[in-house]
Amino acid sequence: MAVPLDPGLYIVATPIGNLGDLSPRAADILSRADLVACEDTRVTAKLLRHVGARVPMRPYHDHSDKAARDDLVARAGTQAVVLVSDAGTPLISDPGFKLVRAARAAGRHIVTLPGPCAAVAALTLAGLPTDRFLFLGFLPSKEKARADAIAEVAAIRASLVLYESGPRLGATLAALTAELGERPAAVAREVSKAFEECVTGTLGELAVRYADAPPRGEIVIVVGPPDAAPQAGDVDAMLAAALERMPAAKAAGEVARATGVPRAELYARALALKAR
Ligand code: SAM
């Protein structure tokens, strides 16, 4: 007989395509849960069968009524309630935020079991900067709202990560190109499944590729940040050109305005260049 779990809310990440990605700990918690709250009971029933768990399920969405949420929070005071979504990490473009907020307000024990998340998986494939990234989820489908949402983040120095569907991919890439210009980007498709692929190029190239060829399957778009800070070689070349027209102090000022590199640093470099 399995040892019962402590009462609480368990947030369990599930595979985004490959059942082998379900962690042993996730399988164990699913098997010992008292109740599994899920998006679609048919989808979660397959997962429970896969781990041999016979656990009651209850549909839950963030638009479920407050009574449904309150009931789950009350149960989590005496039972192990697991929250899963159809695939990936709950709460990430999936239900759960309101439930976790309510459970926290009620002082429930809350445990998370980390695991697959399409956004993070795509970032690892894209070959684009990962030190800073902004997750945008799904953009609005209406043209104006989508353009506004992109314009709002255009200046942010971070890679952008977006969820998208095949039929909308071409239009979304075209809108990203119009607002952001030719940034490097990647389209990660069917991650962890048989036909996984990651196509890279500039936004414009990808927009053309997918304009009339909507791909099948699930998609994450990753867009590189706006032009990175100028490299030392670029700055030296700019300084050298400026030094042909003006003295070091003025050249440093001009290049500082163009690049954002501190003027004092550029002045020292300008003097070093002149001394060569
Ligand atoms: N909570 C999930 C997660 O952690 O990734 C995301 C759920 S969201 C409703 C579904 C979207 O995630 C899909 O439309 C697609 O953009 C992306 N996605 C999910 N699985 C994917 C996969 N295997 N490959 C690429 N994108 C995927």
Image (cartoon, rainbow, N blue to C red):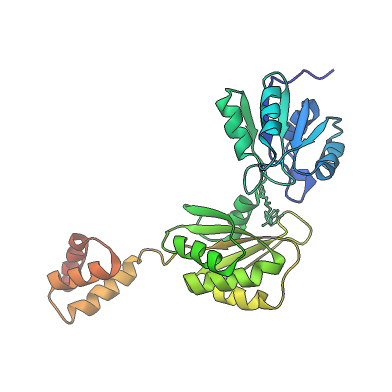
Above-or-below relation of 98 to 210: above
Residue at point 32%, 66% (across, down): 232
What residue appears at the point 33 percent right and 70 percent down from the top-left corner? 233
Viewer can see residue 259:
yes
Taking the image as shown, residue 267 lies to the left or right of residue 198, namely left
Look at 82% across and 41% down and name the residue there. 41
Left or right, 61 with reference to 106 = right
Residue 163 against residue 2 in the figure, above or below: below
At a point 41% along the width and 63% down the height, the residue shown is 155
Above/below status of 191 relative to 245: above
Give the mark count: 0
Q: Quadrant of the C terminus?
A: bottom left
The picture places residue 129, in percent across and down from the top left corner, at: 50, 58
Q: Quadrant of residue 258?
A: bottom left
Answer yes or no: is residue 202 visible.
Answer: no
Work out whether residue 201 or residue 231 is closer to the camera in this orientation and state it.
201
Residue 98 occupies quadrant: top right
